[in-house]
Amino acid sequence: MEQKIIEIIAEYQGKPVSCYNPDQKFTEMGLDSLDLAELLIQLEEAGIVVELSPQINTPAKLAQAIKE
């Protein structure tokens, strides 16, 4: 799931997947709250529904929240 999240972010920002790692904070990736809302919309379109909280600030933590 981490890889899928990173692929979505990379496509959204127009950068290679290799620019990201699962433990990198979303803000360090250059994502703001509107970007994160777009990420959630894209995940929902893929059938994955999750709510973000301040503690979910990396792709790894988001993937873990989806598993729970």
Image (tube, rainbow, N blue to C red):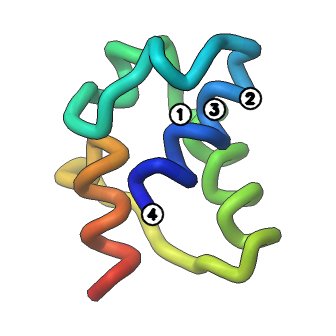
Q: Residue at x 74, y 28 (%)?
A: 12
Observer-nearest of 3 and 67? 3
Label located before the other in sequence (1 or 4)? 4
- Check disc 4 and report the residue beneath it: 1
Which is more foreground, mark 1 or mark 3? 3
Q: Is there CB contact under 8 Å for labels 2 and 1?
A: no
Q: What's the CA distance linking mark 2 and mark 3?
A: 12 Å
Residue 20, horizontal then vertical, whole percent: 41, 22
Q: Is residue 33 above or below residue 4?
A: above
> Is label 3 in a helix, a strand or a loop?
helix
User: Which residue is painted at 49% across and 74% down in the image?
Assistant: 50
Q: Residues within 10 Å of mark 3 (few under 14, many from 20)?
A: some
Q: Are marks 1 and 3 in contact (CB under 8 Å)?
A: yes
Residue type indicated by callout 2: Glu
Residue that sits furthest to the bottom in the current view = 68
Q: Which residue is mark 2?
A: 11
Q: Please name the residue shown 47% across and 49% down the image.
A: 3
In the image, is 14 to the left or to the right of 68?
Answer: right
What kind of residue is marked 4? Met
Residue ID for mark 1: 33
- What's the CA distance linking mark 2 and mark 1? 17 Å
Judged by depth in the image, the label closer to the viewer, 2 or 1, is: 2
Q: Are marks 3 and 4 in contact (CB under 8 Å)?
A: no
Q: Position of residue 35 (x, y in %)?
A: 63, 32
The residue wearing badge 3 is: 35
